[in-house]
Image (cartoon, rainbow, N blue to C red):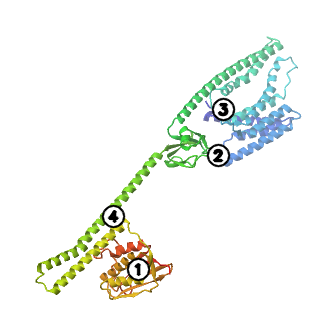
Amino acid sequence: MHIAARDVGRLSRLTAGCAGVTVAVFGALHTSGTGPAPALIPAGIALMLQVIPVTGVRAGRLRAVAAALLALAATGAGAAALDTHPAAAVATALSGLALACLDLRVPRQGGGIAFRVADPLLLGAAIIALVALVPRLFEPAFPPGRGPDSVMPPYLAGALLCLATGTILARPETGPLHTLDDTGPRAAVRRLAPALIAAPIVAALVSAFAARTGSSRPVAAVSTGVILAALALLALLAYLVRTLDDADQRQRHLVAELKERQDFAQTLLQSMNEAVMVLDANYRVIDVNRRWRELTGHDHPPEDAPPLPPPGTGGDWLLPRADGTGVPVLATMAAIPDAAGTPRGYVATYIDIAERKQAEEALTEHAAELERGNAELAAALAFKNDLTSMLTHDVAQPISSIASLAELLCADWADLPEDIRLELATKIDKNTRRLIKMMNDLQLLFRLDTGTVTARRVPVPLLEVVETVCGDTSGSGDVEIVIDEEVAALADRGHLTVVVENLLKNALTHGAPPIHIEAGRENGGTVRLAVQDSGAGIPADVLPNLFGRFIRGAGLGLFIARHLVEANGGSVRYEHAEPRGARMVVTLEAAAS
């Protein structure tokens, strides 16, 4: 049981305050005498200040400073009488120092209860006072006129003993009578301390009583008292030795039990399948288990902890290995709280998820492949639909025209005039050429889709290609060509011919004359070829897909032209001509002059 319970603590401090008043009054009554008696006045006042209750931090500090100053004054006054009254001066100085250092504690190594500096000082002062008082108790056993000698006057010794006792009672929660354990040598000393102090006093009283009653001679009475005191002390010493032996056995049992628990905890830690790292409150590594060493490649715990997830969280983490690589893990950081809830350490747990990550990456890659496959299938389906739409619209028209004209010729050949037969045959030829052009475009389209079209680039004069295309294209009489003979592009001649032909036919079909074709060199080593008509231009809703694969009514010309230009390292774009018309601009690499 702690002696610092609320009621007992109040009574203890009240007793200490009364002792301080008594010591101060005693010192004031003996100020005329010699020795350290005047030093008892500031010592008693300091003791009273130590037990007076105050409220507020500032008031507590002022009280502590005033008590310390008075205690140091008592220490100095006591030390001043060292030459005349050495024992009393030393006891007074020790009591004053104890009062000044009443709340000073020194931590013990390895933790445990802090050591209070005042305790040995009070013990020394009490021993000196008891040494002075005990011989006086044997005074009745001596013949009249002959008493025992003493190291100081009894009144001063009693005052110092009262001061030491009051100082002990001033702090019952931290003094020598306080213990956190009701067993062990310290508790035994606490319980036997009154008997140890009372034994010589009782022996002295027995001796004095025997001498006063005449039942024994003075020497025999003193001897009897000494023997009784010795026997009592021996009995108490035997009890203390037995207590020490019991405490040693309990300590051995506790140490063995602690080691067994430690071995069990270590075995449990090392047998876990998860990698575990134990850290202290400052994130220093205390221990790791076998799985952690296997996972990281470290033979010993690292001096510095690796990057850790925040306490109380968990999730995917990358645990660094000894070779500089990282292991994907599922990391959890948990705090180990003490009784007050403050973290006293941390446990980091890592679960290897490398296989899971590989499976996730494989699934992601497979999903991406499926997505790409779906996109290719969608593109192929769109190509099929567009091709079907074009065949049913653009290809079916010339075929049906050829079929109807041929049927008319066959059925009415003899009845048709010569000029009508020639006109019908000419239309059949025209539709046949148109159909052949479509088939050639489709064949080229398939080659472009499969990536089998390659460009053999050579210097090609643009004027020569444009004039050849205009000469072979019907309806190109209103074409104006503005190209210098020196302008040449680095391109495949066949590809460039198809590009110019498709752009010119597009201008003739969807635009209006006159048609302007111009070309020239530009800065940066390129040539620019522009085909411009004078029509209404291209509607805004058609522009986004102008160079797409299929545009109803426009055929494949612009789509093929774009791909052939890009295969030759160039580009093609649309510009709105001013004041009206559409302009197709082709940019190619210029040939060396």
**Numbered disc 3: secondary structure:** loop
Disc 3 residue type? His
Rendering quarter of residue 293:
top right
Position of residue 467 measured from the top left corner of the image (x, y, whole percent) = 37, 85
The CA span between labels 4 and 1 is: 28 Å
Which of the two discs, 2 and 3, labels the residue nearer the N terminus? 2
Q: Which residue is mark 4?
A: 379
Q: Of discs 4 and 3, which sits in the foreground?
A: 4
Q: Which residue is mark 3?
A: 178
For the question of whether residue 505 can be seen, the reply is: yes
The CA span between labels 1 and 2 is: 94 Å
Which of the two discs, 1 and 3, labels the residue nearer the N terminus? 3
Position of residue 223 measured from the top left corner of the image (x, y, whole percent) = 80, 14
Query: Where 196 falls versus 74 (above or below)?
Result: above
Disc 2 residue type? Thr
Query: Where 216 falls versus 84 (above or below)?
Result: above
The CA span between labels 1 and 3 is: 102 Å
**In the image, which disc is placed on residue 585?**
1
**Numbered disc 1: secondary structure:** strand
Query: Where 348 falls versus 528 (above or below)?
Result: above
Q: Which residue is mark 2?
A: 55
- How many other residues sit within 10 Å of disc 1, few (<14), some (14-19) or many (≥20)? some
Position of residue 505 measured from the top left corner of the image (x, y, whole percent) = 32, 81
Q: Of discs 1 and 3, which sits in the foreground?
A: 1
Whether residue 432 sits left or right of residue 7 in the image: it is left
